[in-house]
Structures are given as structure tokens and as C-alpha cells.
């Protein structure tokens, strides 16, 4: 459209619904919105009318089902566009701040995201802290009040001085003076962004569709302040601003400059103060500072003055008016304070996802002959309700006939240049404006081409660097937890090696030696046999009666009873020397064992120890009578093993799989909560609008977590190999590489969980619920050969099975890299 060239934001026939099929809810009904360049546009309406959804579409966070959005001349999200990105400043309703960041850290974070120089960030920081009356920029966001957090959020939106500034209720919680100051600033600079996709219609922002290739929307061309503060609570104010400055690729000088201004302007506390220490209003101001940081072409503020005192509210408005006039910044503000919007050059009034009116405030007041915008809005709501009831009535009576509804609801004497209110049509029939599902059509070919052109973009190093610094700051704020993460693998491998795989010792066993009691007290062969059994392994307690020995076993005090008959020595001699094999001789020459077989490992250990001791005893008896002791050898010869030891240990079988499992499940814990927490606090969306892509977020997390995981793997191998003597006969480097790759797999699984879950409790349930199924089906604890054939086949698809087998090949067989694949596949044929 030709007129879109003079528009910062153009929304055409926009439809957006949530859900699918019969559960579909229509949020935007055929919205048309036009924001000329260099003005302040007030988007008004009650909660739930679709203001925030429309703003998210403009910044490229959501896609329309139908329609078009053009922001700053391009579609939001298009390649090379600054929307989302540096061209747009966005302040959401939530503060969307890192609570453990200081105000300065928040501004520097967004400055780096927008690729601002350090000098520019400092300059903007100084201005915004002063302008928004923020506390010390070193103060953490978590230490600020709610109103202060709102101001920090506004500072983040203003930081890069975007072409388009979108503020979602920026003056909530701001005192009147600061509210006036903010409005003056907005009027001085003045426009919009995009990150949802409409179901139907078109949105044009700064001349292009939001998200189109090369567009700065989302990106640096847009500053965005969401409704939530969307701040990292453990960041300081300065850290928040530097984070967003880096995201926008601002230089350090620019970030510091903007930081100084914003901290002063928004009346923020010390920039070193943590966000978590700020009040709600202060957090809102830090959020605003983040939106203002890069001085975007388009500034979107979602209720930026909520919780801001009146003086600061006026100050913010003065600044907005100033930048809209001097730097041609386009500003979109949503607010519950309808009268506050009179400072805007143009307002749009929304209700139930529909645009009721759009014009200059003064023209709206004259048109409807009212003294306040509140009354204008009330009158429009009554008209809209009457029209809604008429449409339902006509739809019920003339459903099969074409219905001609006038395109606007103005009085007959209204001027033609005033407000247009669109009516929804489908083949001439009026659609009842309810929440029933609609069939929204989208050309799949066009959509696929857009995806290929706009989203397959190489990651930007400055954004990855900014996100890495953000993650490192978060880690720095939790040193105790970081040290605990390093201790976890040490504790787990130590407990495993100390408690699992060792031979049972000091097994209590009852003994009834009838020969010693009733026969020969010394010099009999029964005592010689018992002396061959290591007392450190099996500890015998003698009983004088057979029944007592059996009773203590039945009562669970002993693991078994050993019974020796009174003529044991003579029977042994008759059997070995006289070769007597009658049943009585065979019975009397045997050691009778009555075992408690409820514990497999203990019972097998007792049997093994006694059988081996009996074999040694028989050879000694034969030797004493000058008979070749090899007669007592079994008819099976076990040669030296090809792999492993002649006496295998369960520890050497299970330890490689356990080391793989420990790193895998720790990696899940490193990443599983990332997206959920940041989504919940609005931080992730704020990063998207700053132009960050999913691959950049994941790469930054993986790179940072790599160093944590590297230390965990080193500690794990040192304790397992050198302290607990777990055999690793192969290459240590190959073992480390395999464990590290399994850690990457765990981090990927954690990111998957984090992306599909909405709440922390869901993440915990999915992560913990998947531990045992993966562990038990991967051959970590028990050989795969012990599984049913179906389960053995399914085990090939678990993330640990092949890694565990590979680790065992390295540890026990010294298999080199090129033989691993062959060995593993042969074992799974």
C-alpha cells in the first residue's frame, strides 16, 4: 500500500485467534490500525480487549491468522529488519526484568543485545536513571519496589532510542510528576513493533511486515516495555541495561551514556542495586529504561506508568513527547488511564478485540460532544453493544440472506474524516462476535517461503555474547548453588562406589556342628573345612541344637544355617579313600546349607564362598593322603578372560553406565527450568523482541553450561578412576568426550522439557518422572540381555543405551574410537 510508506505501523484486516478448531477463541476481529511516523499513539481499552495481543503481533512475537502487519516499512521478523530488535523499544505490562540484576546490569544487557557500544550504553544509562528517577543503578531489581521495577522496564525499552517505541501501560504505579515527565519525553521523541502472527489481515511496521528479513522489528528498531516488568530479579539495574544494550549491539560508551541518563530521568535508585530489592514501581521504571535504552525508531510501552508517582509520570510523558518530535520516534502506549492518553497525538479505542474508534483525542471529543475520553469510550461501548445485539438478531432471522450493514456507526451528521469502525463479513453474512471457532485460512506455500527467508538466519555473535554474559551474571549471583552443582557428581559417584557393587561382608550364619558337639572335639575334618571359610566374609555362630539353629534363621536374625553331621570326618574318608558312594555316606560327608534366599546377592555370595572353600578343603585332604588333588577339579576349565578380570565385579559393570547417567541427569537440571522461568516472567519474550532468535538463546546456554559440565566431568572421572579405582582401561580423552556429548544430549532434553511445559511443577514432574524409565531401560543397572525382546528393541531409542555400552567398551575393553560403532551394533543385533 502506498500510504504505508508514511506510516510507522500499518495493521490491515488483522485476525488473531488462540486454540484450534472448536476450542478456538478469536481475540482480534478484523483490526485496522494506522500509526503515522513521529507521533504518540494511545491504544486504549479495558483489560482483556486484545491490546497486548495486538502489540505482540506488531513486534513479531505472534503471527496473524489473516491480515498484514508492516512495521517501519517491513514485516516484523524479516531478515535485516530491526523489529524485533534495535529498531523497536518495547515495555510489556509485566516488568520482565532479571531480578538478580542491578539496574545498570539490566540496561547493559539490553544494550549489548542491541549491539550498542559501551560508551552509548553508559550515556543512555546515565540519562535514563536520572530521567526515570531510578534509585542507584547498582541496586538490584529485586530490591526495587513494583513502581521502580516498572520504570527500569521502561528504561530498557528506551535504551537504544528505537524508531518504534511500544509501551504497555508504562505509567502504572508512577507518581503524577514523573508520569508528566515521561509523557513529555515521549512527545519529544515519538512509534510500534511485531512478534505474534495474525490469523488474518496485514500488519505493516516501519514500512515492512514485522519479522521480515532485514527488518529491525523485532530487533533494534523497536523498544518494548511489556505489562510485566520482565526483568532478571538478581541483576542490578546497570546489569539489566547493559544486557539489553549488548543485545542491541550498542557500544559500551553508548550504553553507559544512556544508562546515566535513564537512571537519572526515571528517578531510579543506585544502578548497582539489584532488581529484586526494588519496589514494584521502581521495577516498572527499570523495565521502561530497558525499552528506552537503544533509542528505537518504534517504542511500544504496555502500561508504562503503572505504579509511577504523578511527577515521574509527567516527566516520562514529557520525554516521550520530546523524542517523538525531535527524533521522529514512533510510540505506541497502552494504558488503563484513558484521560492520560489525551497527551497522545492519536488514540485507538478497543473493546473485545475490535477497534471502536481511531483519531486525534481532540477530534474524538468534538465528534462525540464529550469533555473526557472516558465518556467517549463509554459512549462507543454502548454503541458497540447495541450493534452486537442487532447483529445477533439479524443473523438469527435472516441467516440465509445477504445482510448489508453500514461500515461505520457514526451519526448522520458525522464528518467523513472521523472514525471508521469495521464490521466483520463473510460472504455478506454478519458474523456474531462470539468466541466460537472460525476457519482461518493461511496459504501454506507463502508461509513456508516466509519461514525459509526470514528465520533461517545465522546467529549473531554479539547477541550470543550478551546472552552468555547474562547467564554468567545469573550464575555469579548464586555461587553457593554453583558450588553445590560441582559437588553433586562427586557425592553421587562416591555414594555409588561405596554402596553399590561390593561383595557382602560379615554375613551372619548359624552353625550346628554335630561332629564337634557329639564326636571328636579336635582333629576332625569339619573344623578344617570351617577354617577355610573367611570369617570376614561369613561369621558363624554355633548352636548346640539343630532346632535352635533353624529357628534363628526363620526369625530373620541369620541368613542361613550350616549343618554338619556327627560322622562327617569318617564319611569323607570313606568317600575319598574307599570310594563308597552309598546314600548314607554321601549324605554324611556333605555340608548341608539351609539358606534365606530372599536376598539374591547375599545368598549367591554365601554359596560362592562356601563352594570355593570346600574345593580348597577337598584338595588339601587329598594331598594329605598322597592323592592327586586335581581329582577335585570340576570338568570345566575357565581360561584367562579376554576382557575383564577372572573375578568380575559388579562395580566395574555398573560404574560406566552410572557416570554417563549422572552427567545426563545433571545436564537436564541445568536447562530444564530455563525457558519456563523466563517465559513466566516475560524475560524470554523481551529477548525475542530485542531480535534474539531461538538458536542464539540455546547456543548461549549450552556454551555457558559447557564450562560447568566440564568441571563436573573432570571431578567425576578423578574420583571414580583415581580414588575409587573404577577401571578405565581405554582413552580418558575418549571417555570425557563421550560423557560430554551425553551431557549435550541431556541439555537438549532439558531445553525440550522447558519449551513444552508452562509451569515449574510441570517441569519437575516430567524431568523426575523420566529418570527411572530411562535409567531402567538403558542397561545401566541390569544387562540388556535380561530384558524381554520387545523391551530390548525399545531400549535402542532411549538416550542412554548406546552411550552406556560405548562407555563400557572404553572402560573394560580399551576400544578405540573407530571400533566403538561396530562393537555397539554387534551387541544389539
Image (cartoon, rainbow, N blue to C red):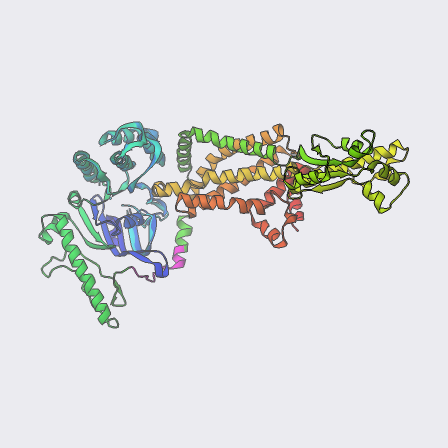
Residue at 41% from the left image edge and 44% from the top image edge:
761
Position of residue 238 in the picture relative to residue 674 (left or right): left
Q: Which residues are the magenta region?
A: 435-447
* Residue 776 showing in the rendered view: yes
Q: Quadrant of residue 623?
A: top right
The residue that appears at 84% across and 45% down in the rendered structure is: 584
Q: Residue at x 42, y 47 (%)?
A: 757
Residue 790: percent from left, percent from top: 61, 54
| Residue 798 spot, x, y in % from top left | 56, 48
> Can you give x and y, in whole percent of width and height, for residue 24 in the image?
34, 58
Residue 762: within the magenta?
no
Q: Nearer the viewer, residue 733 or 488?
A: 488
Main SS of residues in magenta? loop
Q: Is residue 529 left or right of residue 427?
A: right
Residue found 80% across the figure and 31% down from its top:
528
User: Is residue 401 toward the left or the right of residue 61 in the image?
Assistant: left
Amino acid at each position: 500500500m502506498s500510504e504505508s510508506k508514511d506510516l510507522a505501523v500499518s495493521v490491515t484486516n488483522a485476525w488473531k485467534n488462540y486454540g484450534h478448531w472448536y476450542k478456538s477463541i478469536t481475540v482480534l476481529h478484523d483490526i485496522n490500525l494506522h500509526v503515522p511516523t513521529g507521533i504518540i499513539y494511545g491504544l486504549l481499552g479495558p483489560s482483556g480487549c486484545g491490546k497486548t495481543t495486538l502489540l505482540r503481533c506488531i513486534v513479531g512475537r505472534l503471527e496473524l491468522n489473516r491480515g498484514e502487519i508492516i512495521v517501519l516499512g517491513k514485516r516484523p521478523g524479516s531478515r535485516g529488519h530491526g523489529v524485533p530488535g534495535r529498531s523497536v523499544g518495547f515495555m510489556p505490562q509485566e516488568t520482565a526484568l532479571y531480578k538478580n540484576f542491578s539496574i545498570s546490569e539490566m540496561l547493559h544487557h539490553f544494550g549489548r543485545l542491541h549491539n550498542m557500544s559501551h560508551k552509548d550504553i553508559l550515556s543512555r544509562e546515565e540519562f535514563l536513571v536520572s530521567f526515570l528517577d531510578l534509585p542507584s543503578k547498582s541496586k538490584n531489581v529485586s530490591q526495587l519496589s513494583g513502581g521502580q521495577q516498572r520504570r527500569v522496564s521502561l528504561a530498557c525499552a528506551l535504551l537504544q532510542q528505537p524508531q518504534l517505541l511500544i509501551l504497555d501501560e508504562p505509567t502504572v504505579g508512577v507518581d503524577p510528576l514523573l508520569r508528566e515527565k515521561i509523557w513529555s519525553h515521549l512527545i519529544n521523541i515519538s512509534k510500534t513493533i511485531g512478534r505474534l502472527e495474525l490469523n488474518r489481515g496485514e500488519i505493516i511496521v516501519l514500512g515492512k511486515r514485522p519479522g521480515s528479513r532485514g527488518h529491525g522489528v523485532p530487533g533494534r528498531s523497536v523498544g518494548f516495555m511489556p505489562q510485566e516488568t520482565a526483568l532478571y530479579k538478581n541483576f542490578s539495574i546497570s546489569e539489566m541495561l547493559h544486557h539489553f544494550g549488548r543485545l542491541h549491539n550498542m557500544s559500551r560508551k553508548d550504553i553507559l551514556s544512556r544508562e546515566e541518563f535513564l537512571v537519572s530521568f526515571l528517578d531510579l535508585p543506585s544502578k548497582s542495586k539489584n532488581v529484586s530489592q526494588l519496589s514494584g514501581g521502581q521495577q516498572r521504571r527499570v523495565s521502561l529504561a530497558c525499552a528506552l535504552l537503544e533509542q528505537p525508531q518504534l517504542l511500544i510501552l504496555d502500561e508504562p506508568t503503572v505504579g509511577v508517582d504523578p511527577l515521574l509520570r509527567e516527566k516520562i510523558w514529557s520525554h516521550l513527547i520530546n523524542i517523538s518530535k525531535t527524533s521522529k520516534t514512533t510510540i505506541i502506549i497502552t494504558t488503563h488511564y484513558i484521560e492520560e492518553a489525551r497527551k497522545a497525538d492519536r488514540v485507538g479505542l478497543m473493546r473485545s478485540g475490535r477497534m471502536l474508534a481511531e483519531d486525534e483525542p481532540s477530534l474524538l471529543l468534538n465528534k462525540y460532544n464529550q469533555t473526557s475520553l472516558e465518556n467517549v469510550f463509554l459512549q462507543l461501548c454502548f454503541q458497540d453493544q447495541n450493534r452486537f445485539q442487532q447483529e445477533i438478531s439479524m443473523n438469527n432471522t435472516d441467516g440465509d440472506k445477504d445482510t448489508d450493514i453500514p461500515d461505520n456507526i457514526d451519526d448522520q451528521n458525522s464528518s467523513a474524516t472521523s472514525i471508521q469502525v469495521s464490521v466483520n463479513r463473510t460472504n455478506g453474512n454478519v458474523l456474531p462476535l462470539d468466541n466460537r471457532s472460525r476457519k482461518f485460512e493461511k496459504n501454506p506455500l507463502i508461509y513456508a517461503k516466509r519461514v525459509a527467508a526470514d528465520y533461517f538466519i545465522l546467529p549473531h555473535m554479539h547477541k550470543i555474547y550478551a546472552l552468555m554474559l547474562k547467564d554468567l551474571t545469573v550464575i555469579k549471583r548464586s555461587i553457593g548453588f554453583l558450588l553445590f552443582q560441582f559437588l553433586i557428581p562427586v557425592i553421587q559417584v562416591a555414594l555409588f562406589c561405596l554402596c553399590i557393587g561390593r561383595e557382602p561382608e560379615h554375613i551372619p550364619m548359624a552353625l550346628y556342628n554335630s561332629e564337634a558337639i557329639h564326636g571328636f572335639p579336635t582333629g576332625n575334618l569339619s573344623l578344617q573345612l570351617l577354617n577355610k571359610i573367611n570369617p570376614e566374609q561369613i561369621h558363624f555362630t554355633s548352636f548346640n541344637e539343630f532346632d535352635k539353629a533353624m529357628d534363628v534363621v526363620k526369625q530373620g536374625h541369620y541368613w542361613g544355617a550350616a549343618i554338619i553331621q556327627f560322622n562327617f570326618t569318617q564319611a569323607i574318608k570313606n568317600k575319598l579313600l574307599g570310594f563308597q558312594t552309598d546314600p548314607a555316606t554321601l549324605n554324611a560327608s556333605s555340608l548341608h546349607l539351609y539358606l534365606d534366599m530372599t536376598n539374591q546377592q547375599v545368598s549367591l555370595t554365601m554359596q560362592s564362598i562356601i563352594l570355593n572353600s570346600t574345593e580348597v578343603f577337598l584338595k588339601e585332604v587329598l594331598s594329605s593322603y598322597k592323592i592327586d588333588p586335581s581329582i577335585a577339579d570340576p570338568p570345566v576349565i575357565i581360561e584367562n578372560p579376554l576382557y575383564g578380570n577372572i573375578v568380575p565385579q559388579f562395580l566395574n559393570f555398573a560404574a560406566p553406565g552410572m557416570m554417563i547417567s549422572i552427567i545426563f541427569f545433571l545436564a537436564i537440571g541445568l536447562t530444564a527450568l530455563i525457558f519456563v522461568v523466563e517465559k513466566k516472567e516475560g524475560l524470554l519474550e523481551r529477548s525475542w523482541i530485542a531480535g534474539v532468535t531461538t538458536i542464539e538463546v540455546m547456543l548461549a546456554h549450552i556454551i555457558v553450561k559447557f564450562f560447568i559440565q566440564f568441571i563436573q566431568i573432570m571431578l567425576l572421572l578423578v574420583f571414580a578412576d583415581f580414588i575409587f579405582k573404577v577401571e578405565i582401561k581405554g582413552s580418558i580423552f575418549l571417555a570425557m568426550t563421550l560423557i560430554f556429548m551425553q551431557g549435550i544430549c541431556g541439555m537438549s532434553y532439558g531445553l525440550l522439557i522447558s519449551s513444552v511445559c508452562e509451569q515449574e511443577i510441570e517441569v519437575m514432574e516430567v524431568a523426575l518422572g523420566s529418570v527411572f524409565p530411562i535409567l531402567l531401560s538403558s542397561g545401566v543397572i541390569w544387562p540388556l540381555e535380561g530384558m524381554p525382546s520387545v523391551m530390548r528393541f525399545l531400549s535402542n531409542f532411549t538416550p542412554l543405551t548406546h552411550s552406556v555400552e560405548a562407555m563400557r567398551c572404553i572402560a573394560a575393553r580399551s576400544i578405540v574410537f573407530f571400533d566403538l560403532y561396530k562393537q555397539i551394533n554387534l551387541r544389539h543385533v
